[in-house]
Amino acid sequence: MKDIKVLGPGCAKCQELFNTTQEAIKDIGLECTIEKITDIMEIMNYGVMMTPALVVDGEVKVTGKVPSIDELKQLIV
């Protein structure tokens, strides 16, 4: 089971990444957990300096942008 985290303080782009990620997961039919992390200290623990960011199984995949659904599918699988 994949562990996915969306990191960001709660801005519009952070929410967009969370929603788009949920849609990509649904399209793939992947069983996973998805969590939204808004705590700045926890975000910094991942070494992320620009949000939003996507973390898949502990590895930062994207920072500072919202990828397309197709890009997200490739990053998640």
Image (cartoon, helix red, strand yellow):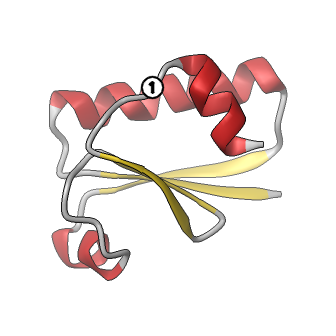
Instruction: Kindly identify the residue that appears in the image at 15 percent across and 36 percent down.
Output: 11
Quarter-of-image position of residue 30: top right
Relative side of 32 to 61, left or right: right
Instruction: Kindly identify the residue that appears in the image at 39 percent across and 32 percent down.
Output: 17
Please say if 66 is above or below 43: above
Relative side of 5 to 40, left or right: right
Residue type highlighted by circle 1: Asn
How many numbered marks appear? 1
Instruction: Kindly identify the residue that appears in the image at 49 percent across and 23 percent down.
Output: 20
Residue 68 image point, x, y percent: 49, 19
Please say if 47 is above or below 25: below
Is 9 or 73 nearer to us in this picture? 73
Residue 40 image point, x, y percent: 18, 69
Relative side of 10 to 75, left or right: left
Residue 42 image point, x, y percent: 30, 76
The C terminus: image quadrant: top right
Q: Helix or strand or loop: what does disc 1 sit on?
A: helix
Relative side of 59 to 76, left or right: left
Is 12 or 51 nearer to us in this picture? 51
Which residue is labeled 1 in the image? 19
Instruction: Kindly identify the residue that appears in the image at 37 percent across and 75 percent down.
Output: 46
Residue 10 image point, x, y percent: 19, 43
The N terminus: image quadrant: bottom right
Is 59 or 17 nearer to us in this picture? 59
Please say if 72 is above or below 45: above
Instruction: Estimate how packed mark 1 is, as few (under 14), some (14 to 19) or many (20 or more) residues with alpha carbons within 10 Å.
Output: few
